[in-house]
Amino acid sequence: MAHTEGKAPEDEKPLGFPILVGDIGGTNARFALVTGRDAETQFMPTVATADYATIDDAIGAVLRETSLHPVSAVLAIAGPVDGDEIPLTNCPWVVRPKGMPASVGIGDVVVLNDFEAQALAVVALGPEHMTKIGPGEPLKDAARVVLGPGTGLGVAGLVHALGRWIPVPGEGGHMDIGPRTAREEVIYRYLDRLEGRVSGEQILCGRGLVNAYRAVAAASGAIARYTLPAEITAAALSESDPIAEEAVDFFVACLARTAGDLALVFKSRGGVFLSGGIAQKIIPALQTGLFRAAFEDKAPHRTLMSTIPVYVITHPLAAVHGLAAFARRPERFGLETAGRRWSRA
C-alpha cells in the first residue's frame, strides 16, 4: 500500500467506531463491540465454530443480534497471519478480509494472532482477574510471557519499549519437550508422536491431556476409561481415579517446565501468565506446589525463577478485553498492522 507525503499511511490511521473485536479460536468465537474510546465494551454471544461454515456466517449471525453495525473489525485468529487468505490452525475456517465489505459490510479489518490478543489482555486486565500461583512479585514494565493450553498450545511474549507494550507472537507451543524422571521416560514410550517427536502440543492442550492420560494408563497396565479432557480433569480433582490424577500431575509438571523455559527466554520478571479454559479448570492442581517446584527447577537459575510470579488469567473473555484495549487506544501498543490490515478503497 503506497504512502502519500503529508498523510498518515492507511495502516496507521485510527480504526473507525463502532469496532467489532473477535477472538476466533479453534472451538469457539467470542465477539464484542467497542463503540468509542471511553465506551464500555458490549459483549456479544459466543458461538461454536462448528456451528457455522465460515467466519463470515458467524459474524453475520452475531451482528443480527444488535442494532449497531461496525465499520471496522479487529480479529484475532488461532493461526499465523500471512496473505489475504488466512486459515485457522485447528478449525476449517479461512479468514478472507478482502471479502468482508461484501459479505458482512465491514470495510476496515485488522487480523492479529490469537496470542497477540492474549498478550494484550495481560495489561488490559486487573488483578481481580488473576489467580497467583506461588511467590514472586512483578517488576514494573518488565517483560512478560503468556501461554495457554487449549485447542492447541499458544505462546507469546510481551515487552515494554519506547513507552509501548509490544506483543511478540510465535510458535512456542511446538518446542520439543522431554522426560525428566525415570517414570516419565516410561510414560513417554506410550505418547502419540508427531513425525517421531513430542512437542508441547502433544501434551499441553486438550487432545494432549488425553494423549498423556492414555500414555499413563498404558504405562500402568491399566485401561483408559476417559476420552474427554473434562472427564480426566474432573476425575483427577475429585481424587476418584489415580490414573487421571497422575496424568494431570504429569501435565502440570510439563506445563511448568515449558513456562519456566519461556520465562528464561524472555527473562520475564513481569510475570508468566497462564490463559485459557484448561488452566482455569485445574487451578487446584496448579496450587499444590508441584507447578512451582517444576517451574523453579532451572539450575543454575533457581533464585531468579523463585522471584518470577505466575498467574492464571481467570477472565473468560480475556483476549476480547485485550483486543478492545487495542481498538480503543492503539497508541498504547507497539503493534504493527502493515500487511495485516485490509481497508476498502
Image (cartoon, rainbow, N blue to C red):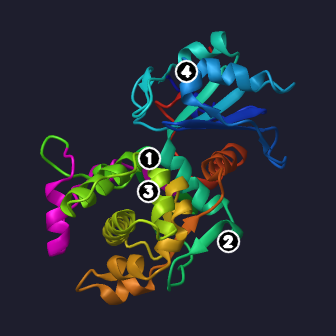
Instruction: Report crowding for label 2: few under 14, some 14 to 19, many 20 or more residues within 10 A (C-alpha).
Output: few
User: Which range is magenta?
Assistant: 166-193
Amino acid carrying label 1: it is Leu
Amino acid carrying label 4: it is Pro
Q: Nearer the viewer, mark 3 or mark 2?
A: 3
Q: Which mark is residue 228?
A: 1
Disc 1/disc 4 C-alpha distance (Å): 34 Å
Which residue is at the front of the view, 11 or 80? 80
Q: Position of residue 16 (x, y in %)?
A: 74, 31
Instruction: For the residues labelled 1 and 3, say whether their Cβ atoms are less than 8 Å apart.
Output: yes
Task: Identify the residue at image location x=40%, y=76%.
Answer: 291
Instruction: Report crowding for label 3: few under 14, some 14 to 19, many 20 or more residues within 10 A (C-alpha).
Output: many
Q: Nearer the viewer, mark 4 or mark 3?
A: 3
Q: Earlier in the sequence, mark 4 or mark 2?
A: 4
Q: Which mark is residue 97?
A: 4
Which residue is at the front of the view, 187 or 146? 187
Task: Identify the residue at image location x=46%, y=38%.
Answer: 78
Residue furthest bottom as drawn: 303
Q: Nearer the viewer, mark 4 or mark 2?
A: 2
Q: Is residue 3 visible?
A: yes
**What residue would you read off at disc 2?**
127
Q: Secondary structure at mark 3?
A: helix
